[in-house]
Image (tube, rainbow, N blue to C red):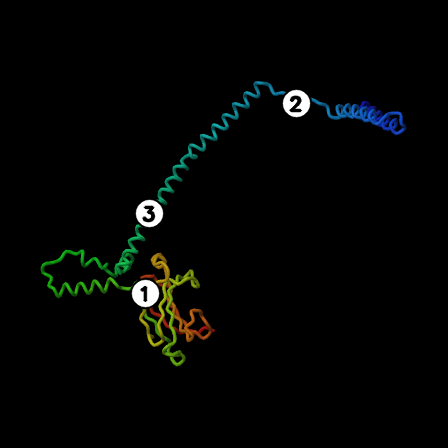
């Protein structure tokens, strides 16, 4: 240990001893202890000033910092070799696609309100109702031919979006009453328990049932049906008329079909256990 430190510690003990024997007043002893402790701290923790960096070193450090900040700023402004330009292009393309989708959706809704079939968009099976009005009139067409053409156009205009036939398996014919409820439901394959796209309610007396799904049978927004890629049609016979499936209900469903199919056929051939 440092001899000076040992000497100061001995003096501190001596001051305590003198005070305890009444040779020093308390204020004198405290003053001496304060002075001795200050000297002791100076020995233990020397007040050495931090070394100063040369002016040249500090100047080079400032220059390096400016270069670093300037380079980082230029990196951000440049967009990292075109990334900013690419991001802006992607955003612009997204806006264009959204606008086109909104226009197409508006056109589909207008056709639905006019009672036109949307099948021409997919298969070209039905002509729009306006086709007869937009075609140039021929002077050789008689009044009866024009009336027949108008009737045909009207029939095509109200063509269903989805249609088919449901039959009951003969093994269940003796187990159902004519007034039992039949629920015909259209759903997407990936959402078998969610909100149906469309639903029709009839009675067993209507079986075999030729169903037609149009906008009136849809549940919620028609856009849900328009945007579906595939659908499944199911049928359920309920004696209670409940919207929930119960044991004893008779069920059947179609294969996965396109939402514009017009020849969907299946049989009610299973019982819920």
Q: Secondary structure at mark 3?
A: helix
The answer to which quarter of the image holds residue 176 is bottom left
Q: What is the number of callouts on the image?
A: 3
- In percent of width and height, residue 45 lies at 73, 25
Q: Which residue is nearer to you in this view: 181 or 234?
A: 181
Between the residue at mark 1 and the residue at mark 3, the CA separation in whole angstroms equals 29 Å
Residue at which label 3 appears? 99
Q: Secondary structure at mark 1?
A: strand
Which residue reaches farthest bottom?
174
Q: Secondary structure at mark 2?
A: loop
In this rendering, position of residue 132 left or right of residue 225: left
Circle on res. 78: none
Tags 1 and 2 in contact by the CB under 8 Å rule?
Answer: no
How crowded pointer 2 is (Cα within 10 Å; few <14, some 14-19, many 20+) is rated as few
**Label whose residue precedes the other's in the sequence (3 or 2):** 2
Which residue reaches farthest top?
55
How crowded pointer 3 is (Cα within 10 Å; few <14, some 14-19, many 20+) is rated as few
Tags 3 and 2 in contact by the CB under 8 Å rule?
Answer: no
**Taking 74 as reference, is 201 above or below it?**
below
**Label whose residue precedes the other's in the sequence (1 or 2):** 2
Residue at which label 2 appears? 50
Between the residue at mark 1 and the residue at mark 2, the CA separation in whole angstroms equals 88 Å
- In percent of width and height, residue 212 lies at 31, 67
Circle on res. 213: 1
How crowded pointer 1 is (Cα within 10 Å; few <14, some 14-19, many 20+) is rated as many
The answer to which quarter of the image holds residue 114 is bottom left
- In percent of width and height, residue 145 lies at 13, 64
Q: Residue at x 33, y 45 (%)?
A: 96
Between the residue at mark 3 and the residue at mark 2, the CA separation in whole angstroms equals 67 Å
- In percent of width and height, residue 1 lies at 80, 26
**Label whose residue precedes the other's in the sequence (1 or 3):** 3
């Amino acid at each position: 240990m440092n001899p000076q430190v040992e000497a100061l510690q001995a003096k501190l003990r001596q001051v305590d001893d003198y005070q305890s024997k009444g040779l020093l007043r308390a204020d004198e002893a405290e003053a001496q202890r304060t002075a001795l402790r200050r000297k002791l701290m100076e020995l233990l923790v020397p007040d050495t000033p931090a070394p100063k960096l040369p002016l040249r070193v500090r100047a080079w450090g400032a220059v390096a910092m400016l270069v670093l900040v300037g380079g980082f700023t230029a990196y951000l402004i440049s967009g990292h070799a075109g990334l900013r330009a690419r991001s802006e292009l992607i955003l612009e393309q997204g806006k264009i696609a959204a606008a086109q989708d909104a226009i197409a959706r508006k056109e589909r809704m207008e056709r639905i309100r006019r009672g036109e079939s949307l099948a021409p968009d997919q298969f070209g099976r039905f002509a729009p109702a306006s086709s007869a009005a937009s075609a140039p009139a021929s002077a050789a067409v008689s009044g009866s031919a024009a009336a027949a053409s108008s009737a045909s156009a009207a029939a095509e205009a109200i063509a269903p979006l989805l249609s088919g036939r449901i039959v009951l398996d003969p093994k269940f014919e003796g187990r159902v009453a004519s007034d039992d409820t039949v629920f015909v439901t259209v759903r997407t394959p990936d959402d078998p328990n969610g909100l149906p796209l469309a639903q029709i309610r009839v009675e067993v007396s209507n079986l075999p049932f030729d169903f037609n799904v149009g906008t009136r049978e849809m549940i919620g927004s028609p856009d849900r049906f328009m945007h579906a890629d595939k659908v499944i049609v199911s049928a359920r016979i309920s004696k209670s008329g409940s919207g929930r499936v119960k044991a004893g209900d008779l069920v059947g469903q179609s294969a996965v079909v396109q939402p514009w199919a017009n020849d969907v056929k299946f049989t009610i051939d299973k019982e819920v256990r």
